[in-house]
Image: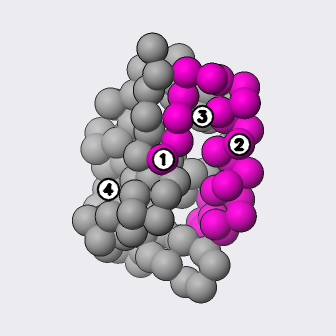
Amino acid sequence: MCVIIPADVLLAFALLKRDKISFEQIQILRETIETQNPNIILDISFPSIDLALYYYPKLFHKHGQYISRSSDFPTLGGNDYIENEFLNLLNPEIKSAIEKSL
């Protein structure tokens, strides 16, 4: 069974570990995860990333070739908010596979 992970979930996960991520790093991350886990598909298409930026402006901010945490990230609850809003939706096996690649 294939699982499609949208860009907002991937960005939330990545930005828990770092302050920003480049589009090139997102592409490398996708290739790494999908190669190691053929049942995971990361949707990092422009529309998926654009929707993440549109729906979560208080979390994600685009700066040139990077997407970073917004200045509101800590006031939203930071890690707890991300865990409850995005990561609880993931199967523990998939969550682990993504975490290992970060």
Residue, disc 3: 98
Amino acid type, callout 4: Gly
Q: Which of marks 3 and 1 is nearer the N terminus?
A: 1
Residue range (magenta): 18-43
Within 10 Å of disc 2 (Cα), the crowding (few <14, some 14-19, many 20+) is: some
Q: Is residue 63 above or below residue 19?
A: below
Report x, y in % for residue 9: 42, 46
SS category of the residue bearing label 3: helix
Q: Relative to residue 78, is residue 36 depicted above or below?
A: above
Q: Nearer the viewer, mark 3 or mark 2?
A: 2
**How many marks can you see?**
4
Graded by Cα atoms within 10 Å as few (under 14), some (14 to 19) or many (20 or more), the crowding at tag 1 reads: some
Closer mark to the observer between disc 1 and disc 4: 1
Q: Where is residue 15 in the image (x, y as percent from the top left)?
A: 54, 57
Secondary element at image label 1: strand
Q: Mark 1 points at which residue?
A: 43
The 10 Å Cα crowd at callout 3, few under 14, some 14 to 19, many 20 or more, is many
Residue type at mark 3?
Answer: Ile
Q: Nearer the viewer, mark 3 or mark 4?
A: 3
Q: Which of 54 and 31 is in front in this view?
A: 31
